[in-house]
Structure formats: C-alpha cells, structure tokens
Image (tube, rainbow, N blue to C red):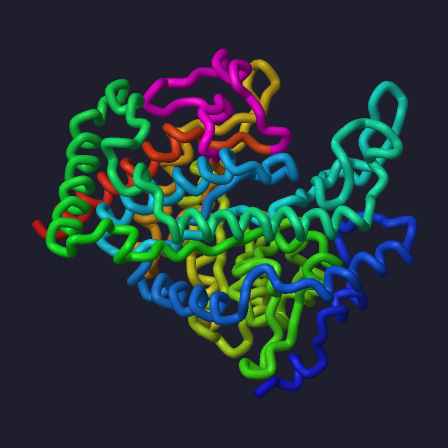
Amino acid sequence: MKTPEHQAWNPTSWQTKPAQQQPVYRDQAALLDAVAQLSRLPPIVVSWEVEKLREELAEAQRGERFLLQGGDCAESFEDCDSAKIAQRLKILLQMSLVLTHGLKKPIIRVGRMAGQYAKPRSADTETRDGVTLPSYRGDIVNHAEFTPTAREPDPLLLLRGYERAALTLNFVRALIDGGFADLHHPEYWDLGFVGHSPFKLEYERIVASVADGLEFFETISAKEVHQSLRADFYASHEALVLHYEQAQTRFIPRQDRWYNLSTHMPWIGMRTAQIDGAHVEYCRGISNPVGVKIGTAMDAAWLQRLVTTLNPQNIPGKLVLIHRFGAKDIETALPKAIQAVRATGHGVVWICDPMHGNTETSQSGLKTRRFENILRELELASQIHRDAGSHLGGVHVELTGENVTECTGGARGLADLDLQRAYKSTVDPRLNYEQSLELALLIAERNRVSREARRR
C-alpha cells in the first residue's frame, strides 16, 4: 500500500528538484531518445534479488550478518575485461571466506561494479594551459581525453554503460555458478605477502583453519564447496547520473512497488545528499536498499531528516548509512551520529567506509591512503558501535584485484616512494590485492581476540 507521499512520486519527479553533479547535454532530443531506448531494454537485476538483499541487510542490522562491499573507485568501460572482472571477484570472495571464518557469521557480498561509471567532480570545468573544458565525469558521461569532442557529454554513453554493466554482471554470475577452484582453497591464493608481516603466525593459522574447514566440509558432503553453497553476489553503484537510474526504474505489479533494476543497492554520495535535492527525491521512491555516505559535514538534523525521508516506514534493511569520518574524527563524530539516528526511533544498517576520510596527499603529489589509518578507523568503528549497543554491519572499501601501489603500508611496507611504481587509478587510491586480503585477515584476527577477551 503506497503512502500519500509515495503516491506523488514517480521516476521522473527528481527533475522538479535541484540536481547536483549532472552532466549538461546540449542535444536534448538525443538524450530523450537514449533514455527511451534504455527504458525498453531488459533490467540488469530483478526485484526478487533486490528483496533478498534487503532481507539479508535486515539481518546485518540485527548483527546476524556482515556486509563486505568493495570494488574500484570508478569503473571504466575498459574494465569490462574478463581477467579484470575475475580478479575483482576473486579478492572479494577470498576476503568473504576469511571474514566468514573470523566473524562466525554469514557475509553479504556486494561489489562496487557493473555500473560504477560516474564520479562526482569538485568543479564543472577543468582548465589546462588556458583552455577550459567540461570536467571528465566518468565513462558513462564523457571521455577522459582533454579535447572539446571528448569532454562533450554524450547521451549514447548511457547505453554503452548499460551494456558494459550487463556484460560485467553476467560474467560474474557465470563465474560464481561455475565455481573458482582457487577461490575456495587457500593453497591456491597469492599469499606471498604473509611472510613479510609481523602477524605471520596469526595469518598462517587463519588460512590453515579456513583450509581445514573447507576440506572437512567437502569430505563429509562428497562435493566441492561451491557445488553445495552458492555464493550470492550483489552489485552496487552510486546513483549519480539520474537519467540512467530513471530509465531502469520499473513498477513491478506483483510487488506493488517501484524498483531501480540497474543495480541491487544504489547509494547517495555526500555531495548529492541534500534533503530537497534530486537524488534524495529519486531514492525515496524506490524499494531497493539505499546507501547514504555520511561524514563530519552532516549534522544531526540533516542526518535525521535523511533517515525519515528515505525510510519513512522504518523497513528493516532498507537504509544503509555508510560512515566515512576518518581515523582522526571518528571517535567524536560517530557516537553523535548513532545518537542522532537513535532519536528518530528508526533502525539502519551501519557500514564503515575507512577509505575516504583517510585520503591524503603524498610528498610526490599523488593521493594516497595509509593502511594503518584504514585499519584504525575500522577498529574504532567496531568498538564505538559495541560501546553504544549498536552493530557495525559491514565495511565499504575501494580495492582492486591487481597489485597496484596506491595505498601505503601493509605487510610489504609500501612507502610514498613506491606509489609511482604502479599507480593506475585516475580517481581515488585503492587497496591492492595483498592489502585487501590482509585487511580481511586482520579483521578476522582482531575479532577473535576481542571475542576471547569478552569470554574471560
């Protein structure tokens, strides 16, 4: 049953609100044609998958599951490559196995992929050598080359983005259904970094325990683990370019609800979370779980209005708050946010993004993040939620399956001088394969120690 508020909503009602971070298309006829074409194409996901994710997020809200959300800061169309997709899926599934073992609860696997083709910009234009052109806003909007033709927003790229997203998620599903041998057996994992860590013995114990558990399961079931336990995998991206999101929004009669079927869980970034803005207006009307990034700039009143606007019926698992305060501010900011949300009487899924609040500029001028700060923010988030009687329901990280050098620290001790060796990101620095797996191992080990301490 729709509330009066939602009866006034439709997929285009966002166009009546101020819209931040939107490309300016000169050819409106071409834009309308692209949106019309996209509206007729099959959905990338289906409503029952969205509902299943919401139910699992409701369990995370109660502390019964843990969400692992990860992927590239921004996908490019060139990332629609079988090897790159397999690498990203591999690290996410390997991390989820480690976390399942360490946290003793099921893991919800959500990839920042199959649609993460747009990024917000701090300015609408970019100037080089006296020439000013539109900013590059991601492959779904324009091209990175600094030429007038490349930087002109092109509506046809909305269709190209849909195609790449569909191909990516289709390949992910095929890989999961077929099973990766090296995903389930740690003896095939890339664990060379372990020997460089002061936690070498702890890591080896965790890996051995995971391997023993899988071997025992396969022995008693007479099946490989992937044949008995299907690893559900969900997609997520920032709902930034609203014409794209609108075009894939469908009313499902049997559910009597509207769904964004371009992804399972869209999210709203800090720059587009205005209460009276177009992105909040769009997201309030869809039945998908919706994420919202929150930071130190968001006061209690703003946060409370977001909670009640985006989930007025207080549906469990519907609203995911992804806090990104940084290691230096989380001890002050997170307790206030928890208190503000609690005052509304609404429940939310709390997720820690330990990446964005810890971005800094290295001596070489490259953006980076320190592994120790990422880990520190996660540890503080877990402790603060526990002290407040709340649940940390998951972690949101920017990572890649490749061994890039974009974040410092980790077992190999990457330093500022190492960054230029393999710095590939055009937007934000990501954890590489080794750092990502090490983060999962450390979360698992810290949780074991904390659990044993509470038993004493």
422 and 197: which is toward the camera: 422
First to last magenta residue range: 400-427
User: Left or right: 95 with respect to 3?
Assistant: left
The verdict on residue 360 being magenta is no
Answer above or below: position of 233 versus 280.
above
Residue at the extreme top: 417
Location of residue 47 in the rendering, given as x and y in whole percent from the top left corner: 53, 70
User: Residue at horizontal 85%, vertical 28%?
Assistant: 147
The verdict on residue 425 being magenta is yes
Location of residue 24 in the rendering, given as x and y in whole percent from the top left corner: 85, 49
Answer above or below: position of 287 versus 75.
below
Quadrant hosting residue 303: bottom right
User: Left or right: 362 with respect to 7?
Assistant: left
User: Residue at horizontal 45%, vertical 35%?
Assistant: 87
Task: Let me know if residue 45 appears in the view.
Answer: yes
Question: In terms of secondary structure, what is the magenta stretch mainly?
Answer: loop
Location of residue 15 in the rendering, given as x and y in whole percent from the top left corner: 79, 65
261 and 195: which is toward the camera: 261
User: Residue at horizontal 25%, vertical 39%?
Assistant: 185
User: Residue at horizontal 64%, vertical 64%?
Assistant: 42
- Total numbered badges shown on the rendered structure: 0
Location of residue 431 in the rendering, given as x and y in whole percent from the top left corner: 45, 31
* The N terminus - image quarter: bottom right
Answer above or below: position of 409 versus 333.
above
132 and 262: which is toward the camera: 262
Task: Let me know if residue 300 appears in the view.
Answer: no
